[in-house]
Amino acid sequence: MSTTAVAGGDNRTGEPVPVNAVRSPAATGPLATLTEVLAIGGRRMRRLKRNPGRLVGITLNPLITMIALGYLFQSAIEIPGSNNYMEFIFAGVAVQVGLASIGPTAVAVCLDLQGGLIDRFRSLPIGRSAVLVGHTLADLVITLMGLVIVVGVGMLFGWRSHADALSVLGGFALLAVFMYTMLWVGVLLGMASKNLETIESISGIVAVVFSFMSNGFLSVDKLPGWIRPIAEWNPVSAVITALRHLWGNPVTVAPSFPSEHPTAVIVISLGLLFAVTTVLSIRRYRTASA
């Protein structure tokens, strides 16, 4: 293939850049970017047919937690002001779906890097962010499919919302935002690590620590003293508290700023996390082949 140095191309090494690596003016603009995002996302969704284990991995741990705690042990655990433990823990179980999506996304990105797929994408005349955005949007659809399964099982075991339809939809919208932020955490983890075992270990630790060191399954005041401040300021606790309010489920509010102002904690923590992970992921993607 003939090559030539193109003005505006990535020619920092002084080597010629493939002609087809530079987007033509006709291939730029919102419509072209949307087409690229849909193409990348469609490829990711087609892979789900060949590897349905991705969906199983997202839903397995939340379902086990819900059945073990919410159904088998519900009579042994008491929540102040409520006798329905399933309704109390369901927000924590739903958040686990988002945390469980970090690992599979990170593994998929790492495999794409190792297999040279990212290099092939970078040689094509497509936007550099379109690949990662398309990837995360497709993973968001898959994660929401897993959430539907968890919600269905939760309703079979007794979970109910006690709020108006708008508030219930608002809760699921907040949950989708949380999930999408976690997917970018997975992208960054996959970009930064070249070892699949390391990714699986880190993602597993994150899913367990951030879900159980929160108010998802016990009131914060029931936790050991040294864990209590961590659980109170855990962003996952703020998301869980907001979901319980929106769904009309039992809420235990400790006398602390995060518990009394979960919205502020969510906006600041998730906003910063999303900004940092997207910027670092896209920057890492630009230098991935190096």
Image (cartoon, helix red, strand yellow):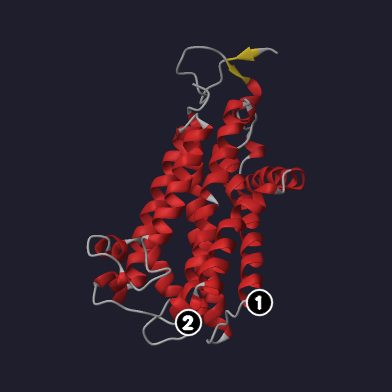
Q: Tell me the distance, in whole angstroms, between the alpha carbons under discs 1 and 2.
A: 16 Å
Residue for point 45% across, 18% down: 12
Where residue 109 sits: x, y (%)?
57, 37
Name the amino acid type tagged 1.
Answer: Leu
Count of numbered labels shown in the rendering: 2
Residue 173: % across, % down: 54, 69
Which comes sooner in the sequence, label 1 or label 2?
A: 1
Residue found at x 55% / y 52%: 101
Q: Tell whether 128 sits left or right of 12.
A: right
Q: Pick out the residue farthest to the front.
A: 76
Q: Quadrant of the N terminus?
A: top right
Question: Could one spot residue 182 in this view of the protein?
Answer: yes
Circle number at residue 265:
none
User: In the image, 85: left or right of 154?
Assistant: left
Q: For residue 123, say whether it is visible.
A: no
Identify which amino acid the numbered label 2 is placed on: Asn
Q: Which residue is labeled 1 in the image?
A: 156
- Graded by Cα atoms within 10 Å as few (under 14), some (14 to 19) or many (20 or more), the crowding at tag 2 reads many
The location of residue 88, given as percent across then percent down, is 46, 77
Residue positioned 50% across, 23% down in the render: 10
Q: Relative to 281, is 236 above or below?
A: below
Q: Residue 42: x, y in percent?
A: 72, 47
Q: Which quadrant would residue 66 be assigned to in this image?
A: bottom right
Residue at mark 2: 249
* Local secondary structure at mark 1: helix
Q: Answer with left or right where residue 257 lies relative to residue 14.
A: left
On screen, 137 above or below 111? Answer: below
* SS at badge 2: loop
Circle 1 residues within 10 Å: few <14, some 14–19, many ≥20 = few
